[in-house]
Amino acid sequence: MFRVISLFSIVLSFVVPASVSAAEKPKQLLLISFDGAHDNALWAKSREIAARNGAHFTYFLSCTFLMNQDAKKAYQAPHQKRGRSNVGFAQSDDEIRLRLGNIWHAHLEGHDIGSHACGHFDGREWSQADWSHEFATFHVTLTNAWKSVDLQAPDGWRELVDHGIKGFRAPYLSTSEGDGLIAAEKAAGFGYDASLVTKGPALPVDRDGIVGFGLPLIPEGPQHRPVIGMDYNLFVRHSMGVENKTNSAAFEERAYDAFKAAFDKQYDGERIPLQLGFHFVEMNGGAYWRALDRLVSDVCHRQDVACVSYSEAIPLIAARKTQQASGL
């Protein structure tokens, strides 16, 4: 399984006083992440957006998308029938081969590969043992992924699988009550969890040795009602979760306005990191991906902005606290 990465054993709080001038403020961090990480066309699209804008993203991978039909028959999530997944499986070995190439090249490009477990089940009632079972399946699946489609894994793949997958996001942002998930994450060697929801952009918290990040509620729409900063939640609000391409442009504008306002509030204020989440599905005609592309293109080139992965954000946040404590 994974090793615990020492950089996560740090204090994670910092505050930028309102009186600090813009020149003295730390960089504004923007953390963009994707759940599922399956559609190969969207792998290519997201990597192109990042490369064009000097950004690093975080990809929370569902491991059933690396399972072919033989592996599908063997997969059994906790309390589920064998061969069942809420998000399906890979459709062919060629699809897996292309996906593995995208994952590997994204890693080489500096993006963060994280875990979204495997079959996308709600783990609210899972025990530590249940989570550990799913994490073990994730690890074994990635370890054997290249061999399963008759390819030789590239040098460094095993190092990535064993030591480079540092974060986890729970499907549905649903975590088990008590400390079962946290204990399983620690045993598996994860250093951070990105499953929380916060009232607004917030600093990460220490959850018994696991760095806890949360997607924020952000104001959206004519009434500025709060919504989780994630494409699916906008999809549900805008069209009740039913695909509506007719109003795609209007939905894009609403999403972009919400993203940009949330960014500007932190950029002009305390510069708390802003987190936004997406899926490898272009909902409402791609409205939310277009809004994402616009935001990243607008802000990531600025010298006082860093569009980074979760793993990159952790030491940056720690460095800010050190600078603040030393009066720099």
Image (cartoon, rainbow, N blue to C red):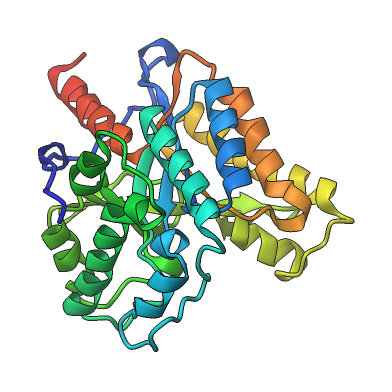
Q: What residue is drawn where x is 45% and y is 65%? A: 68
Q: Position of residue 204 (x, y in %)?
A: 29, 46
The answer to which quarter of the image holds residue 279 is: bottom right
In this picture, is 29 found above or below 243?
Answer: above
How many numbered markers are drawn? Answer: 0
Asked whether residue 193 appears in the rendered view, the answer is no
Quarter of the C terminus within the rendering? top left
Q: What residue is drawn where x is 68% and y is 61%? A: 235
The residue most toward the right is 246
Asked whether residue 259 appears in the rendered view, the answer is yes
Depth order, front residue of 134/145: 145
The residue most toward the front is 150
Query: Horizontal placement of 82 versus 163: left or right?
Result: right
Depth order, front residue of 146/126: 146
Q: What residue is drawn where x is 58% and y is 47%? A: 40
Q: Position of residue 206 (x, y in %)?
A: 19, 52
